[in-house]
Image (spheres, rainbow, N blue to C red):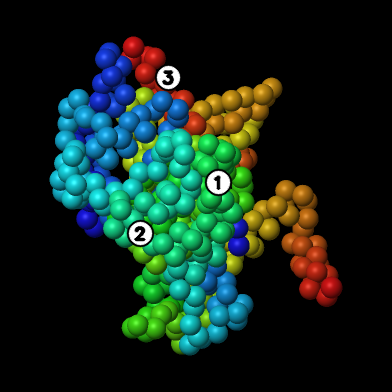
Amino acid sequence: MNAVVDVTNLTKRFGSFTAVDGVSFTIRENAIHGLLGRNGAGKTTIMQLLTGQDFATSGDIRVFGQSPVENASVLQQLCFIKESQKYPDDFKPKHVLRSAPWFFPHWDAEFAEQLVDEFRLPTNRRIKKLSRGQLSAIGVIVGLASRAPLTFFDEPYLGLDAVARQLFYDRLLSDYAEHPRTVILSTHLIDEVSNLLEHVIVIDQGRIIIDEAADDLRGSVSNVVGTAAAVDAFAAGREVLHREGIGGLASVTLSSLGDADRAAARAAGLELSPVSLQQLIVRKTQVSEKEFELSA
Amino acid sequence: MAVDESRPIFLQIAEQIENDIVAGTLAEETQVPSTNEFAAFYRINPATAGKGVNLLVDTGILYKKRGIGMFVADGARARLVATRREQFTTQYVRPLVEEAAKLGISPDQLADLIRKEEAK
């Protein structure tokens, strides 16, 4: 499959702070990617670099085969929905929707209108007077109706309620199915989006710690619970992502257990339980923090 | 079906289709929902749903009619039932016997329990 984004050895420094630290990855055409990580991990910086809104300190970025910086032929294929998009003070949502086709050649006005109804967005109210959730709804609507070949959603739903978020996921899936395109979704609500993702990239402290197909990640990690002695005997020699204990009981998070390992664990009287993508990322980012401290 | 966290989703989709074929909900030679319909219904990525459907195409349980969609193959149900019977011992009987032994239930008592359950 074609890569629409190809990044090699990308580094971005702000003074002495390294926000992005020599990362390399590709984004496959027409797949929904999750760009996940903790606050300040470097997600937004990477998206700003990919969309030509900031300059890399070093490294190479190819978007649709070219550098995105001040490159109209690349930029008109992108849509970047930011966490807190600013609009001119006297703008109303209808102005945003009316000017959108100037920037997005694939804009679907009918779809946008449908979304305005579904999200109950008052289009004739001044942007200053909108609630946080309504502001986010504008971003979501623009991001979906722009049908840009490469769409970035950076924490698009601050203040959106559960109903509106579900609506966003449903419309994203159905419109993506009809109009396949490349989507990069950055969010903290990992459990909510994990089933939507085809590929997962996790950033921690400016580095990529996971870059895998979502289906390969699923089931790759398990919690093993039992008496401390049995758990530790089973975990010996394996990669332990996390361990906690209470009294004589222990619970460890282990990666890559095969069918034979699972059978052995059950035979040893241990309980196995799945680990969600969100828990997995919590565990992995904790581990890399420890490694970081050790190497420092 | 609720998507569970422990296994790849495409396997769960494939299993769900198999269950529907075994139960007779999806009859042979009828059309199965499209990849996009599965994706919307289960709220999963369409590529993942497609992977599940393709798994069954590869094993000959489903077949593709060009330009129309996916259909349940002739003889699919009998083949699935045969496979599941083979797995029945390891998946159901063995754990049942092991648990019964732990609880001090003899094989005869176990057989009695099964007959009582059947008679309900």
Q: Please state which of residues A60 and A241 is positioned toward the viewer in this rendering.
A: A60
Q: Residues within 10 Å of mark 2 (few under 14, many from 20)?
A: many
Determine whether, in the image, residue A232 is placed left or right of residue B71: right
Q: Earlier in the sequence, mark 1 or mark 2?
A: 2
**Point 68% across, 58% down: residue:** B96
**Callout 1: chain:** A
Q: Earlier in the sequence, mark 2 or mark 3?
A: 2
**Amino acid type indicated by mark 1:** Arg
Judged from this view, the residue extending furthest toward the front is A90
Badges 1 and 2, same chain: yes
Tell me: residue A113, above or below residue A63. Answer: below
Instruction: State the residue position of label 3.
Output: A290
Q: Could you tell me residue A137's position as x and y percent?
A: 51, 47
**Callout 3: chain:** A
Instruction: State the residue position of label 1.
Output: A125
Q: In terms of secondary structure, where does tag 3 sit?
A: helix
Tell me: residue A234, above or below residue B14. Answer: above
Q: Could you tell me residue B39's position as x and y percent?
A: 48, 64
Determine whether, in the image, residue A219 is placed left or right of residue A49: right
Which of the two discs, 1 and 2, sits closer to the camera? 1
Which of the two discs, 1 and 3, sits closer to the camera? 1
Q: In terms of secondary structure, where does tag 1 sit?
A: loop
Q: Could you tell me residue A290's position as x and y percent?
A: 42, 19
Instruction: State the residue position of label 2.
Output: A107
**Callout 2: chain:** A
Q: Can residue A113 be spotted in the picture?
A: yes
